[in-house]
């Protein structure tokens, strides 16, 4: 008779060995592990993923811990877990930002590669104020923007400071950082610039726009960059092209065309031009992630729920021409899935931290570039 406990232990050991091999060299397959599970640690739901590789090589995963419900308002903390083994195991949950009864949200991280300092940008509002009230200016409070940092690989974080007056115009109501990650620019005319993607809503028109904020002094101060030329876009992420241009990839609210929108900047995010739809990147109106993979020169990876109608089919796509075309496509998870955050892993693999199965969990998946470039097989969820 089979001892089920021994069988489970054996399978877990086998999984760990397979994943560990992938940590030392490029992984041949996809490994997946749950990082946050809704209904645990005193939180109703975990949402809104952000993940970076700390200077130590550890993975630092941050998300929203929603105390009493699944909604976007109410008591929401920013919580963190870290992995020292490439995403196989994760530490106990830590609360890194909290304001009793109120909303701390939209985590967006970036690592300054010159100083090793990790920066966390986020937003805050009163817990009883919801998005519609803030947009209509009937709320009791406002939506504010905050910055904190860590000098020890995310072990501890500075007290968050209010930077709203530096990065938000008076006629803007709703405001969101990211969510996801920012970038540290490598080339162009502003190497070393830290860029954080954001969005806002105008008070008078109620139009949605994407924009960026940036720092040229290693995160000591933040300035407002440019906004998308056209409206009907909001949550966004940014990637640096081979020639130093920036590409902003944006959530699209034009319901006649369910595809992502993009625009470009030639001056480090201070102005944006050439806004258009990317017809390949279909979406059901949702957040997405985009990231350059430095150990695969020329490769940019994109993740989102690749459906025009529903938040399903978490899909990775790859481009080798700065997003002009997307010849590579593999499905990580063919069930319900929504927000995601990509990360370039130290060994050259791709990591994807994403919402799975109806917001019931946040999962971390890792795969090799070789896997992404393979033609999908006809069976299995990771296609």
Image: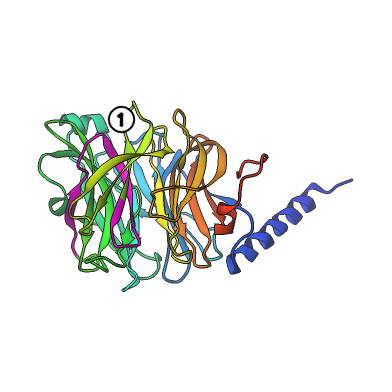
Figure colour scheme: rainbow
Image height check: is 208 above or below 8? above
Segment colored magenta = 221-247
Which residue is the site of mark 1? 254
| Residue found at x 31% / y 52% | 247
Image height check: is 139 above or below 356? above
Query: Is residue 227 in the magenta section?
Result: yes
Q: Is residue 102 visible?
A: no
Q: Is residue 253 visible?
A: yes
Q: Residue 378 sits in which quadrant?
A: top right
| Residue 50 vs residue 29, the one in the foreground | 29
Query: Is residue 368 in the magenta section?
Result: no
| Residue found at x 68% / y 56% | 15
| Residue 199 vs residue 268, the one in the foreground | 268
* Left or right: 180, with 59 as reference point: left
Question: Where does the C terminus fall, quadrant-wise?
Answer: top right
Residue 162 screen position, x and y as percent: 19, 54
| Residue found at x 32% / y 56% | 182
Residue 359 screen position, x and y as percent: 48, 37
């Amino acid at each position: 008779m089979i001892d089920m406990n021994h069988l489970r232990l054996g399978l877990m050991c086998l999984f760990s060995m397979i994943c560990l091999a992938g940590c030392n060299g490029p992984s041949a397959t996809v490994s997946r592990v749950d990082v946050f599970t809704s209904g645990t640690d005193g939180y109703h739901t975990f949402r809104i993923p952000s993940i970076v590789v700390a200077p130590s090589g550890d993975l630092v995963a941050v998300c929203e811990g929603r105390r009493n419900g699944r909604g976007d308002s109410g008591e929401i903390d920013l919580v963190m877990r870290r992995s020292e083994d490439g995403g196989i195991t994760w530490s106990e949950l830590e609360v890194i930002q909290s304001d009793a009864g109120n909303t701390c949200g939209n985590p967006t991280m970036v690592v300054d590669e010159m100083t090793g300092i990790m920066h966390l940008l986020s937003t805050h509002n009163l817990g009883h104020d919801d998005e519609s009230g803030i947009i209509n200016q009937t709320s009791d409070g406002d939506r504010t923007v905050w910055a904190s940092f860590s000098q020890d690989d995310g072990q501890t974080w500075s007290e968050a400071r209010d930077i709203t007056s530096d990065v938000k115009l008076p006629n803007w109501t709703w405001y969101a950082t990211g969510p996801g990650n920012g970038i540290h620019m490598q080339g162009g005319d502003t190497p070393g610039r830290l860029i954080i993607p954001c969005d806002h809503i105008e008070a008078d028109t109620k139009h949605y726009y994407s924009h960026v904020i940036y720092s040229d002094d290693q995160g000591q101060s933040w300035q407002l960059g440019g906004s998308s030329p056209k409206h009907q876009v909001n949550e966004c992420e940014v990637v640096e092209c081979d020639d130093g241009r920036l590409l902003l990839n944006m959530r699209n609210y034009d319901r006649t065309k369910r595809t992502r929108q993009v625009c470009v900047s030639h001056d480090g995010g201070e102005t944006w031009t050439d806004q258009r739809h990317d017809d390949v990147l279909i979406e059901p109106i949702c957040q997405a992630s985009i990231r350059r993979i430095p150990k695969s020169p020329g490769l940019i990876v994109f993740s989102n729920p690749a459906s025009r109608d529903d938040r399903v089919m978490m899909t990775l796509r790859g481009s080798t021409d700065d997003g002009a075309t997307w010849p590579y496509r593999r499905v990580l998870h063919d069930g319900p899935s929504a927000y995601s955050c990509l990360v370039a892993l130290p060994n050259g693999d791709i990591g994807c931290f994403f919402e799975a199965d109806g917001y019931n969990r946040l999962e971390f998946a890792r795969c090799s570039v070789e896997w992404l470039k393979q033609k999908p097989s006809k069976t299995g969820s990771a296609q």
